[in-house]
Amino acid sequence: MRHLRKTPYMYKIKPPNKNQLFTATLFLLALGLYFLIFGSAFFAHLKMPEALIAPIMALGSFVAGSTFLGGGAVAFPAVTKILHSDPNTAKTFSLAIQSVGMSSASVYILMRVRIIPWRFFYYFLPGMAIGLLLSLVVLDVLITPNDLRISFTLFILVFLLVYLWAFSNKDKHYTDLGPLKLMDKNLIIKAGLLGGVLSGCLGSGADLVGFCILALYFRLDLKLATQTSVILMAITSLLGVVLQGFVFTELDQDVKHLWLLAAPIVIIGAPLGAVFCRRVTTRSLLIFISTIVATEVISTLILVPINLSHTPYYFALTLFSLLLLLGLHRASKRKVHKAQHEFREDDI
């Protein structure tokens, strides 16, 4: 029998180790527990068009686990544009489903990532809680849903452009925040406040704002900043669901039905997104994020009615977002990063 010569492509696939098997078993057990408790209700509501939420959130949960955009960046436009639900239902569903998906992704991240900047949470979360409560109590009834959707689209578009420009140079990236000065702490608290307001209005945003500060100001590595933002949004979503479900009683039947259909998908989809974020190159992750943002912008232009009389408002918001993000990047240039530890690829 002729001896088979080894090629460079042979033996590339390694068997899973004990930690990987344990992690996979844990998520499969969570999925089994879901069907044990909610299985009959799941199949009872598995009908069109509501069943479309399952494949939609397969993508949404993957985005939630792998990027700073959060599952709400897919859930909110999909529920309003495809399922034709009202924006309040879409926002409430976004928070509810992210409380499952991003919490699931966070479990994977906490089990696999060695370095998380925990001091950031200490200053970010109080501001987030205040902003979320303020948004649900006051701003929810003052801002029109279309203006919110267009504003969010403009903000993430501007952020992506600024981010790509800022990281086109070869600045060093870091794994920690270094010593925090008073200005740093104030900035994180205000970012938490803004993130909470956005999350209360759109069902997503705390992760995006947290990522802005971590990546543009502290210059954390892209993947580490993304993983930290996932945990931030998981905590924000859990708090949002508690407030909406027990304080404001806004979890209506439509939200519960959509949640039942999407929950088993995101339990697995979000951790897979987190695995993707951890394994791919920074370049590949940027391409994936750019594709998602482009899809968001195009879908908004096609499907969201734009009030031309509000054009000055949209222009002012775009200019403000641009100046804010550019100012954040310039502040990072002035910031002394010497005490921070330089990122190495094997750190995560």
Image: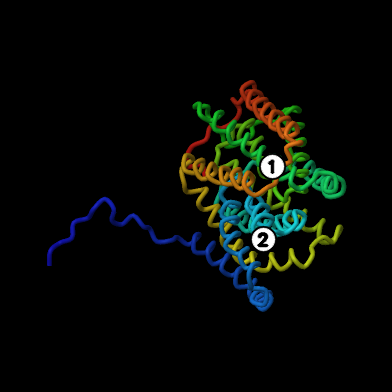
Q: How would you rate the neighbour count of disc 2 (Cα within 10 Å): few for under 14, some for 14-19, many for 20 or more?
A: some
244 and 275: which is toward the camera: 244
Q: List x then y, in percent, for residue 165.
A: 55, 29
Q: How many marks?
A: 2
Q: How would you rate the neighbour count of disc 1 (Cα within 10 Å): few for under 14, some for 14-19, many for 20 or more?
A: many
Residue identifier under label 1: 152
Tell me which residue sits at (60%, 35%) in the image: 215
193 left or right of 19 in image: right
Q: CA distance from mark 2 to mark 1?
A: 20 Å
Q: List x then y, in percent, for residue 266.
A: 61, 61
Q: Amino acid at mark 2?
A: Leu
Disc 2, SS: loop
Q: List x then y, in percent, for residue 175.
A: 57, 37
Q: Amino acid at mark 1?
A: Phe
Disc 1, SS: helix
Among the two numbered marks 2 and 1 on one chain, the one whose residue lies closer to the N terminus: 2
Residue identifier under label 2: 83
Tell me which residue sits at (87%, 46%) in the image: 138
255 and 100: which is toward the camera: 255
Q: Vertical placement of 316 versus 209: above or below?
A: above
Q: List x then y, in percent, for residue 135.
A: 82, 46
Label 2 vs label 1, nearer the camera:
2
